[in-house]
């Protein structure tokens, strides 16, 4: 049984509703946005571990006394060891429209990453082709003509330097499997705790120090600008740096 399933196995309905409410960054009749914990699954997988979708459905059902099955659309996802912003939809209409927004890249997604390795430049753009190895659940950099390879692009800039790590802000232009992790690793910049892509040691809680920090988009129904900021998690990968970072002037979304 995983840590999160053990943690919530005997929790009361009222307590779980309050826990979920505390994680919500934005909610209206169409959307609900959550600050995901590192280690949480977004959706059920073969492990059978507790997932964010089930907990959110539970929250919605018990908060609004919804009868029957609760609808919750998933237009995008985060890797299990990654923390930060995950957006869900409450209606099928919002799901269709948000899926189109993600597909057309009409959304700004920025991540914060703690990385080791020498930086040759304080900012840059990374463009390459990535292909996923399904058996290993890992992506690799390949040439354009490699079967299944897809164009991947992101930009990065240095926010702050520590003794052994650098804090980067990364903006995704495309949304490929493990994209930030593999592209930074290919540049020699290894995300703290990410054993799969070159880290020498894990974080104590098996998280990686990659956090979905901000999201900005036009609301699919109201057509207003939505800007969301997710605070850094209280996880092992960020503990030594969190107070220092939060005491600095925060960059704008």
Image (tube, grey):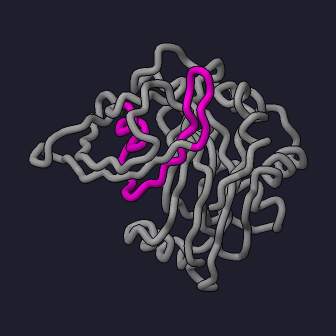
Q: Is residue 197 visible?
A: yes
Q: Is residue 214 shown left or right of residue 60?
A: left
Q: Is residue 190 shown left or right of residue 132?
A: right
Q: Position of residue 8 (x, y in %)?
A: 77, 34
- Which residue range is magenta in the image? 159-185
Q: Is residue 5 shown left or right of residue 48?
A: right
Residue drawn 54% across the image and 54% down it: 110
Q: Residue furthest top?
A: 200
Q: Position of residue 112 (x, y in %)?
A: 57, 44
Q: Position of residue 34 (x, y in %)?
A: 68, 54
Q: Position of residue 239 (x, y in %)?
A: 73, 27
Q: Is 189 within the magenta?
A: no
State the residue in front, 120 or 181. 120
Number of dots carrying numbers:
0
Q: Is 161 within the magenta?
A: yes
Q: Is residue 88 shown left or right of residue 186?
A: right
Q: Is residue 151 above or below residue 209?
A: below
Q: Is residue 49 visible?
A: no
Q: Residue furthest bottom?
A: 222
Residue drawn 59% across the image and 32% down it: 161
Asked where in the image residue 117 lies, by quadrant, the reply is top left
Q: Quadrant of the C terminus?
A: bottom right
Q: Quadrant of the N terminus?
A: top right
Asked where in the image residue 65 lies, by quadrant, the reply is bottom right
Q: Is residue 41 above or below residue 59?
A: above
Residue drawn 47% across the image and 54% down it: 171
């Amino acid at each position: 049984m995983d840590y999160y399933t053990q943690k919530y196995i005997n929790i009361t309905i009222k307590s779980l509703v309050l826990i979920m409410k505390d994680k919500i960054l934005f909610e209206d009749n169409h959307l609900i946005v959550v600050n995901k914990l590192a280690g949480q699954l977004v959706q059920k997988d073969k492990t059978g571990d507790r997932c964010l979708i089930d907990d959110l459905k539970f929250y919605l059902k018990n908060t609004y006394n919804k009868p029957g099955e609760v609808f919750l659309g998933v237009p995008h996802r985060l890797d299990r060891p990654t923390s930060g912003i995950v957006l869900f939809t409450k209606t099928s209409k919002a799901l269709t429209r948000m899926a189109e927004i993600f597909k057309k890249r009409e959304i700004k997604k920025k991540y914060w990453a703690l990385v080791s390795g020498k930086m040759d430049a304080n900012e840059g753009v990374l463009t390459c082709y990535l292909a996923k190895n399904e058996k290993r659940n890992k992506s690799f950099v390949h040439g354009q003509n490699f079967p299944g390879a897809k164009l991947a692009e992101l930009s990065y800039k240095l926010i702050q330097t520590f003794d052994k790590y650098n804090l980067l802000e990364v903006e995704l232009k495309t949304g490929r499997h493990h994209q930030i992790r593999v592209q930074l690793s290919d540049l020699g910049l290894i995300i703290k705790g990410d054993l799969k892509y070159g880290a020498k040691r894990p974080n104590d809680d098996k998280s990686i120090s990659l956090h979905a920090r901000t999201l900005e988009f036009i609301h699919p129904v109201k057509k207003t600008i939505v800007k969301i900021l997710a605070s850094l998690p209280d996880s092992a990968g960020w503990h030594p740096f969190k107070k220092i970072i939060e005491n600095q002037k925060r960059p704008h979304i």
